[in-house]
Every structure is written in structure tokens, then in C-alpha cells.
Image (tube, helix red, strand yellow):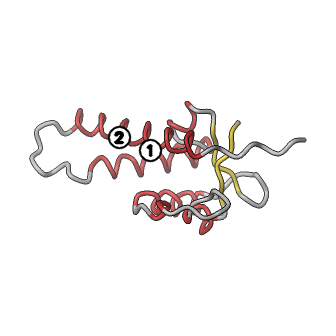
Amino acid sequence: MTEPAKASFGRRFLALAIDWYMSLFISAWITPKVPGGAQFFPLLLFFIEVSLLTILTQASAGQKLLRLKVVDFSTGGFVSPGRILARTLMICLVIPAVFMKDGRGYHEHFTNTTVVRI
């Protein structure tokens, strides 16, 4: 069996953008007239969507569209829900903004995960 191909930065970024804009759209639809009350709502929706879908299907909505999935870096297998939650929280805190030399972000090193193409 061949090893899955690592996802490129461009595909990963596009998947992240899809998830973020989806959260913004839903937030604007749910809270159209809440002045100031919806300031962090898109981020909360993003956290929930990415966490739940990744726990259930190994990929967020954006990753599914681009045929990507999150796997354990060492085994290529499933990632535990706790590690997915930690990974998503770090993404929300913008920790993965600085990538390391092997193309994986800090959030992936801390949770021993990686994103691969399906």
C-alpha cells in the first residue's frame, strides 16, 4: 500500500478559507442584527464545525471539498477527539501561522497530526 501524498500549502489554505467563510456566512445569517454581540461568533462556529467534522469524518467541510483528511503523523490512522480539539483550538489561536521546515504547522507537531490528500 502506498503512503498518502502530503497536502500542499495551497490546498490546505484554501480548505481553511472555505471553512472560515462558511462560518462567517452562517454567523451573519444567524446574528444579523446583534450589534457587537456576534464579534466572536464566527470563530466559535469555525471551532465547532472543524472540530466536529474532523472528529466524525477526519476532515472539515473545506477539507472534504478538496479531498483532504487529517491523520496521525506516525501511523496514518485516526486521530483521537482530544487531539482534534487541541489541534482546532491552536488553529483558532493562529499558532500554526509559522510553519516548520517539514511543511507541518506547530499545531500539527504538538498533536502529532498531518493533512494528506485522499
In this rendering, position of residue 66 left or right of residue 1: left
The answer to whether the residues at label 1 and label 2 have Cβ atoms under 8 Å apart is yes
| Residue, disc 1 | 49
Residue flagged by tag 1: what amino acid is it?
Answer: Glu
How many numbered marks have been drawn onto this rendered protein structure? 2
Q: State which quadrant residue 118 falls in.
A: top right
Q: Earlier in the sequence, mark 1 or mark 2?
A: 2
- Badge 2 density bin: few <14, some 14–19, many ≥20, Cα 10 Å: many
Can you say whether 53 is above or below 108 in the image?
above
Q: Is residue 50 above or below residue 102?
A: above
Q: Amino acid at mark 2?
A: Ser
Query: Can you name the residue that lies furthest to the right here?
Result: 1
**Which of the image's four quarters has the N terminus?**
top right
| Position of residue 94 in the picture relative to residue 111 (left or right) | left
Furthest toward the bottom, the residue is 110
- Residue pictured at 62% horizontal, 66% vertical: 109
- Inter-mark Cα distance, 1 to 2: 8 Å
Where is residue 107? Give x, y as percent: 55, 63
Query: Of tags 1 and 2, which is closer to the observer?
Result: 2
Binning the other alpha carbons within 10 Å of mark 1 as few (below 14), some (14 to 19) or many (20 upward) gives some
The image position of residue 67, as x and y in percent, is 63, 33
Q: Nearer the viewer, residue 16 or 83?
A: 16
SS at badge 1: helix
Q: Residue 24: give x, y in percent of width and height.
A: 30, 40
Q: Is residue 85 above or below residue 11?
A: below
Name the residue: 46% across, 65% down: 95
Q: Which mark is residue 92?
A: none
As helix, strand or loop, the secondary structure at mark 2 comes to helix
Q: Is residue 5 above or below residue 107?
A: above
Residue drawn at (60%, 61%), measured in percent from left and top? Answer: 108
- Which mark is on residue 23? 2
Please tell me which residue is depicted at 30% across the width and 46% down the height of the picture: 42
